[in-house]
Image (cartoon, rainbow, N blue to C red):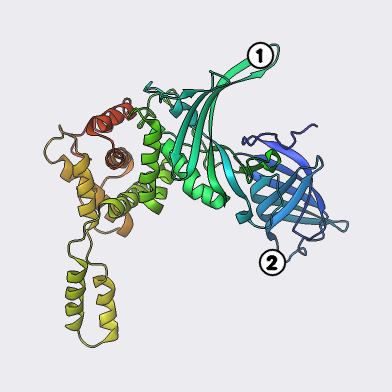
Amino acid sequence: MTFLKFPASARREAFEDDIVLAPPDEAMAQGRIAYDPEAGIELSVIGADWFPELGERSGGFWPVLHGESFAGVKFTLFDCGIRKLQEAAGRARAEMVAATLALGTQVDSPEEVAFKRMGLSLRGLREWLTGGYSQIEPTLKEGKENPDVRLLNVEIGDAGLQFIVEPCESGGRYRWVEETHAGLSITVPEPIPLSRWRTEWIEPLRHLMIFANREQSLIESLSGYPDPVDAFSLIRVFERHETRVRQTTAHSFYQRDLLPAGIIGNTAELIRLWFDFHARLGPAAGFLFGTLNSVGMTIENEFLNLMAFAEAYHRALHDAKPLSTHQHAGYREAMLASLPDDPFVKGIYERDLMFSNRQSQRERTAWLVSRAALADWPDGVEEKLVATAIETRNWLTHWSGKGKHVVEDGELARFNRRFLWVIESNMLEDLGLEIGQIEKCLALGYVWDFPFECVVSDSL
């Protein structure tokens, strides 16, 4: 049987290859590596001196393994562990898994995988840069050498981003395929480790694709150059896909663009606005985009994640403490002084009073709903949305008394869609878009699934 060897590109496509590998400074053992974007990295290794003893309860994990293919390609595996260990006739065989494969280098730490220029392809980037259903395409420049190639250059701080859309052809005599591909490269003044590339560049861009297209996004390819001048310094990174992708539908990428790339006429400025906005969100971004990008999450978990994000979002961008810090400190000190001189009693109230100078979740939710309210909402709808959010959250979190506005099952799924609309409306405004642009974005994003078609219903 003929298997694919290590790929020449960084695209996340399945392959297998024969290898030798070992922890640093250990003797190499023969094995085979298999990569699948959905399953991740799997290894089969035979007769290694560095295997743990059969039955040993520890020692089957290695932060780093070095290896080489029979074609001479060097690589590093990170976070490797034995899933199954067998022994027969004095030889041991291990079935192993690894979290990350870095082709083209042998290093002793993930922090040593550092790029000055990174190449990235994301699911949804092509659709976003070519207009999707909205047909609002960004203004891209034609390539100097090939007019079919279109470019968008963006400066963010001291980093340079270049987005590229280009035609690609493949096939043979009897079948020829033409496709449009999109990707980007980012160049920074000094090499930075892969961990920083993820937090500072990859995740904000993935989140932009999720938000803008209202579709899932994942990394299709990831590579980088420690030294862009040296073509042989290329390192290609392979990991399991971030999520399982839902089966595509007729609506996918074509009828749900919430934030078209050309909506403000200056896509470079829109990207800069997004990076600034995403930085202000901080870790709270993970609540929302992790939820939107997942598959198979229960509606209860989806609801609780949306509520947690909404509270963190308001706290990060619109927090308004009821009292000044000085007032709060004075009142708190006075209340604690009035208590009996009992450390246990004081400890109880000190714990709660420390966090009393803050808005309640109901107040935060009401503010976000009011800000996003449609002009033609009937009286009472805003209050009902807020009551539903808070009472359902309390019911699912504390299993306290079940209020009359608690929703479950299908009604909870419908409420999630409406509450997400509220969140997205606020995000578009905080992104810096004008009211007319926000209305256009929401109309495009919800052209087929507007969540308030039954807004006058008794149950929200």
Question: Taking 178 as reference, is 449 left or right?
Answer: left
Q: Position of residue 334 (x, y in %)?
A: 17, 79
Picture quadrant where residue 255 is located? top left
Going from the N terminus, do you reach mark 2 or mark 1 first?
Answer: 2
- In this rendered view, identify the residue nearer to me: 271 or 302: 271
* Residue sitting at x 63%, y 41%: 228
Q: Quadrant of the N terminus?
A: top right
| Residue mark closest to the camera, 2 vs 1 | 1
Q: Which residue is mark 2?
A: 57
Question: Around disc 2, counting alpha carbons within 10 Å, would you say few (fewer than 14), some (14 to 19), or many (20 or more)?
Answer: few
Q: Position of residue 362 (x, y in %)?
A: 21, 53
Q: Which residue is mark 1?
A: 175
- In this rendered view, identify the residue nearer to me: 63 or 58: 63
Q: Quadrant of the C terminus?
A: top left
The residue type indicated by label 2 comes to Arg
Q: Position of residue 50 (x, y in %)?
A: 78, 61
* Residue sitting at x 47%, y 24%: 141
Q: Is residue 328 above or below residue 131?
A: below
Picture quadrant where residue 427 is located? top left
* Badge number at residue 54: none
Q: Residue furthest left?
A: 379
Q: Position of residue 85 (x, y in %)?
A: 75, 56
Question: Around disc 1, counting alpha carbons within 10 Å, would you say few (fewer than 14), some (14 to 19), or many (20 or more)?
Answer: few
- In this rendered view, identify the residue nearer to me: 259 or 138: 138
The residue type indicated by label 1 comes to Arg
Q: Can the viewer see residue 9 in this picture?
A: yes
Q: Secondary structure at mark 1?
A: loop
